[in-house]
């Protein structure tokens, strides 16, 4: 999960993993981590969700965690114009990493503050199209819980479609780039 400081990354993850919202959530220092099992269209997926601090000084940590990741959620705060512009730095970092995520989703945060919106939907759509994000832009609110489950379901669905394949031997999903199934050891057709 990537985005500028205070866009709501930690709140979104906590809402998803615990179902709760805490208005006094502290900023992440460095990196935080959550795990949650998700069922997408009958397939169980274990999501390992990395929450990266939005401050520029912590971005040096980002590449070592992102290499080999199946997906990336990139958030902007609809009430902060700079947060959409800041995503360009994140996009550039992700694009420069070997074995970067094939699935990138663009997520609007804080849609419960629609009356304070600074970012036009058209501007976000332009960024979405230019950088080939998957799925569609989904507006979320960690405060109300709106569309939180939908974001992670879409992430799981897009990961299954773009980053994983099913082993014909054990029928478990494993990363496309592997030459052997990580579960049963069978050689793949890559």
Image (tube, rainbow, N blue to C red):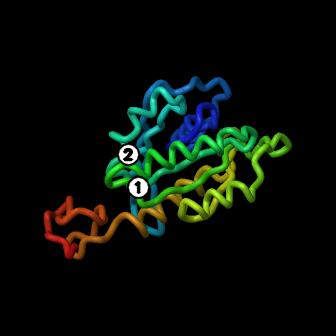
Q: Residue at x 19, y 72 (%)?
A: 188
Q: Foreground residue, 75 or 126?
A: 126
Query: Of helix, strand and loop, which one carries label 1?
Result: loop
On the question of residue 161 being in view, the answer is yes
Q: Quadrant of residue 60?
A: top left
The crowd level at tag 2 (other Cα within 10 Å; few <14, some 14-19, many 20+) is many
Q: Residue at x 37, y 64 (%)?
A: 163
Q: Quadrant of the C terminus?
A: bottom left
Query: Of helix, strand and loop, which one carries label 2?
Result: helix
Question: Which disc is residue 74 wearing?
Answer: none
Q: Is residue 123 left or right of residue 39?
A: right
Question: Which disc is residue 101 wearing?
Answer: 1
Q: Quadrant of residue 25?
A: top right
Q: Which residue is mark 2?
A: 66
Q: Is residue 55 left or right of residue 127?
A: left
Q: Foreground residue, 64 or 50?
A: 64
The crowd level at tag 1 (other Cα within 10 Å; few <14, some 14-19, many 20+) is many
Disc 2 to disc 1, C-alpha distance? 7 Å
Q: Position of residue 12 (x, y in %)?
A: 59, 41
Q: Is residue 2 above or below residue 26?
A: below
Mark 2 / mark 1, whichever is N-terminal = 2
Q: Is residue 64 left or right of residue 52?
A: left
Q: Residue furthest right?
A: 115
Q: Residue at x 64, y 29 (%)?
A: 22
Q: Position of residue 11 (x, y in %)?
A: 60, 36
Q: Residue at x 39, y 57 (%)?
A: 45
């Amino acid at each position: 999960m990537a985005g500028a400081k205070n866009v709501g990354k930690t709140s979104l993850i906590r809402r998803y993993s615990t179902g709760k919202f805490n208005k006094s959530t502290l900023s992440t220092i460095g990196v935080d981590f959550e795990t949650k099992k998700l069922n997408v269209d009958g397939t169980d997926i274990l999501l390992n969700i990395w929450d990266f601090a939005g401050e520029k000084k912590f971005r040096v940590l980002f590449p070592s965690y992102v290499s080999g990741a199946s997906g990336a959620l990139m958030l902007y705060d609809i009430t902060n114009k700079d947060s959409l512009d800041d995503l360009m730095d994140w996009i550039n970092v992700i694009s420069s990493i070997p074995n970067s995520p094939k699935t990138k989703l663009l997520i609007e945060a804080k849609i419960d503050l629609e009356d304070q919106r600074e970012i036009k939907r058209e501007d976000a759509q332009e960024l979405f199209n230019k950088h080939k994000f998957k799925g569609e832009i989904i507006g979320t609110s960690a405060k109300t819980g709106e569309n939180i489950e939908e974001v992670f379901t879409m992430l799981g669905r897009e990961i299954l479609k773009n980053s994983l394949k099913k082993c014909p031997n054990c029928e478990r999903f494993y990363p496309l780039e592997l030459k052997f199934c990580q579960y049963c050891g069978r050689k793949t057709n890559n």
